[in-house]
Amino acid sequence: MHLDDWQDNGPGWHRADAIVRRVQAPTFPRHEARVEDHGALADGVTDCSAAIAAAIDAVRRAGGGRVVLGAGTYLTGPIRLHSNIDLHVSAGATVRFIPEPERYLPPVLTRWQGVEMMGYSPLITAHDAVNVAVTGSGTLDGGADTEHWWPWCGLEEFGWHPGVVEQERDWQHLVELVHQGVPPAERVMAPARNFRPNFIEFYRCEGVWVQGVRIVRSPMWEIHPVLCTGVLVEDVHLDTHGPNNDGVDPESCTDVVIRGCRFDVGDDAIAIKAGREEDAERVDEPCRNVVIEDCTMTMKYGAFTIGSELTSGVRDVYVRRCTIGGPGLWYGLYIKTNAARGGYVENVYVDDVEASELQREFLSCNFLRGEGLRGPRTPTVRHIRITNVRVGRARRALHLAGFAHSPIADVHICDSTFESMAEPDSIENVVGLALTNVHPA
């Protein structure tokens, strides 16, 4: 972005409008297949995996179209989509995924917390597809609970008990494989390792659309496009409070629009990511051109989060016309990095956000979190512009802590109100902080 764009309140936003114009819902051939015609019984008892796969294959062989699930409850294992296919979950339909890990084998290429590996299949997935969608007003039920998937996180509140191998132990094994230079195809983490699958994951796809559905009981992250171009997530209701239940996590993607969604989730509502440490440096793909608009967030950590997996960098993020807050939401704009993760965050615009109540700060960026200075990388955060924001109650408006050798730079807050802050702002190693017409100052 040119400096003139940054200094003028207007030109930056025309870039957001251009992204929205580029990211349109894909269109599909008019061919349609109903899963009931391929043997599915929506009785909540019958395993419909084969019937759903047969309907998808029929549409694929016909050149694309819509696969329709009518009213009722469908039990299934993982669903694999292909180019030019819209999986349509109709009103009154529930797709309930069977929470048996062996059903999600053989392992597939996935990214788990920013690292590529061969893991359990996501519940709904597509690889290297063009024009792919999950639409409708029905419900996707991941089947996760304190007896299935969630105990692997290692927390007793989610069902962990002695004898269950928690993901942190397996994570150290995966990190060691990365350090050794083992390629992703040989980092086989299923079935021997307890890495929970993401719910919906599109990998290296172009023209992605998730629309209308309600998502509940997710094993892990909920909507996770990776290395995709042209991603539209709209009018989705994410309502799942499990561990690491982020809502939408675009990772190393280009041109993403998230709009009209409701987030009531167990972790960050939206978390923009770009891979983690050595593995991200190998792939070397940033996340860029992300627009978030007309969304509502009530739970749990960050409403608009960048990181912590951002080693390849994030730039050009636009947030507008959102309503956030409540007794369960911690942060507004939450940027997470340190010397272990590194990466850059630049050109972040936030406008017209109403925050009723936050447990922590509206804007938080603390390089000293986690590993802090312990790491070989230097994070860079610069060019953040916040306008027309009103915060009712919070701990602080701002918590900014850069490094002395890499200060946070060029943070401008204009025409905003922070009404009832419990503590004064915390500012350390920041250059170019400007407050204009901010109340209280």
Image: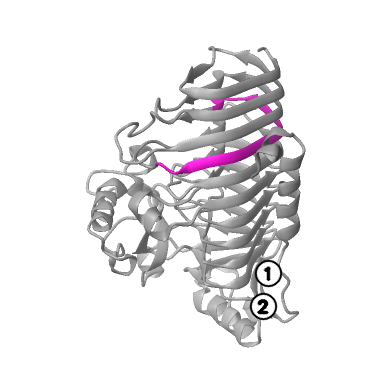
Let me know if residue 365 is in the magenta part.
no
Residue 264 location, quadrant? top right
Residue 191: percent from left, percent from top = 30, 65
Q: Nearer the viewer, residue 385 or 123?
A: 385
Image quarter in which the C terminus is found: top right
Q: Residue furthest bottom?
A: 61
Amino acid under disc 2 = Arg
Q: Which mark is residue 70?
A: 1
Q: Residue at x 56, y 73 (%)?
A: 129
Amino acid under disc 1 = Gly
Give the answer, above or below, for where 416 lies relative to 424: below
SS state under label 2: strand
Circle 2/circle 1 CB separation < 8 Å: yes
Q: Which residues are magenta?
A: 342-363
Q: Nearer the viewer, residue 41 or 27?
A: 27
SS state under label 1: loop
Give the answer, above or below, for where 206 lies relative to 336: below
* Drawn side of residue 232 relative to residue 204, left or right: right
Q: Which residue is mark 2?
A: 34
Q: Which mark is residue 57?
A: none
The answer to which of marks 2 and 1 sits earlier in the sequence is: 2
Q: CA distance from mark 2 to mark 1?
A: 8 Å
Q: Chief secondary structure of the magenta span?
A: strand
* Drawn side of residue 272 relative to residue 434, left or right: left
Residue 380: percent from left, percent from top = 47, 37
Image quarter in which the N terminus is found: top right
* Drawn side of residue 102 relative to residue 43, left or right: left
Residue 373: percent from left, percent from top = 33, 31
Residue 327: percent from left, percent from top = 58, 26
